[in-house]
Image (spheres, grey):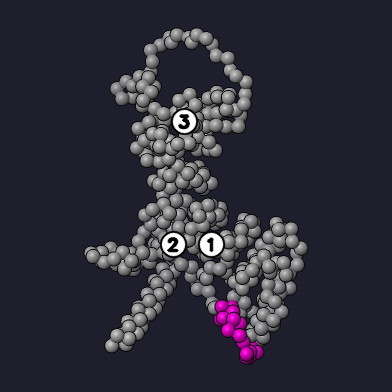
Amino acid sequence: MVRPFNTSAENGGDQVVRPQQSQRPTAPPLVCVNQEGDDFSNPDMYVDFLILGNKENWSVRAEKKPILDSNTQLAHIVNGAVSSTTVVDGKFVVRDVDKDNFEIFVRYLETKFIKFHSANHMLQMLELASRFQCRQLEIHSVKELDLNLTIDHVIEVFRALWYYNSIIPSKAVTGDQQKKKKRSPVGGRKKKDCPTEAPVTPEEYFAALLGNCLQLIDMQAEEVFAQEAMLALRFEELEMIVKRDALQMSSEMVLLDLLAKWSREECLRKNLDLTEENRRRVLGALCYSPRYLTMTRKEFENAKDRIQLLDATESKLVGDLLNGKKTSGLTPEQQTMVANFKQQRPAFAPMPIQLSARSNPKNYPKKMRKAAEDAAGERNSCCDRFCISCARVFACIFD
């Protein structure tokens, strides 16, 4: 139970006058009877935490043994391993936490059970678990976030994961890889020779969830790009999304509209004039992320009327190519740019990493799973060909 606790010295209030003589108890102390109830008469069984608030403080009592056994930061605070610990009237001070979430966290350490109220609450508890280094709750929160992941809050989850040192998303394990991993004994092989394994550490779960957020954005790109939350992204966050290869869109105009809106908002945030040059400057290399040569001539002309992301030379080059004109004398940079503009997007988004029932491969279309298997097989074939080529080179050198 969270209880108000008067510590007027910490809050700058007036000193409370306490009675000189305490009243005598009219009943015996509460003790444990037949293993039921709480034995508050034994202070060694409990530990009190003091949550400092703006106007009043709160006290949270917890069972001492589960706290110490949890091996979390709270356990280190209680056993004196943290030198900066503050103790007031026998209560361990905890700052900058929500009192209700902190009590939920403490009860989780006692019972290993937690009930989430919403996706936002899951993120709050994930942050609390990360702060106090409760690895079990971190992993549990990630699994629940994945289970309840929808387009309504995928951007919120995606942005929250950037709090964890801008982690890199993991790659999904295909069905064939999972089957091979079950059939093939590891034996004496090195770990790097084995297929990618399921996440184990909280950091690996964070990376997997980030990858699943991006995978959901790939699948529902048009709906996600229409959200106002996209316009509030930082450049690095926007870059990770719009550079995705498998964005499922009916037209590149969807991406162009997003870049046009975001560049406008970014110029306003930076107090820049809304000129074409400034809007290209805030977008940087993202100006080249749309696949311009997969658009129709009419779409490209309409896009130019909306925002000119390419300079005059680049725009003319794209226009000539869309009109079927032959070009010559292109620089290597222009050749690379044209090749990128021509690249078709995959017909399907990649498969997610299974973290919950939602991301189970069985919940996705068979064609999508087959496309993921084919893509994985092509990557493995390229790696095999590269290794064979290297072996041949070394054989020639040492022959």
Amino acid type at circle 1 is: Ile
Residue shown at 32% from the left, 83% from the top: 394
Q: CA distance from mark 2 to mark 3?
A: 39 Å
Q: Residue at x 55, y 31 (%)?
A: 52
Task: Give the number of callouts.
Answer: 3
1 or 3: tag closer to the N-terminus: 3
188, 112: nearer the viewer? 188
Q: Nearer the viewer, mark 1 or mark 3?
A: 3
Residue 353 in the image, given as x and y percentages of width and height = 42, 60
Q: Is residue 179 visible?
A: no
Mark number, residue 92: 3
Mark 1 in CB contact with mark 2 (< 8 angstroms): no
The three-letter code of the residue at mark 2 reads Ser
The magenta-colored residue range is 324-341
Magenta stretch holds residue 263:
no
Residue at which label 1 appears: 217
Whether residues under marks 1 and 3 lie with C-beta atoms below 8 angstroms apart, the answer is no
Q: Which residue matches tag 2?
A: 170
Q: Earlier in the sequence, mark 2 or mark 3?
A: 3
Classify mark 1: helix, strand or loop: helix
The answer to which quarter of the image holds residue 258 is bottom right
User: Could you tell me if residue 105 is visible in this image?
Assistant: yes
SS assignment at label 3:
strand
From this view, report whether residue 72 is shown above or below residue 244: above
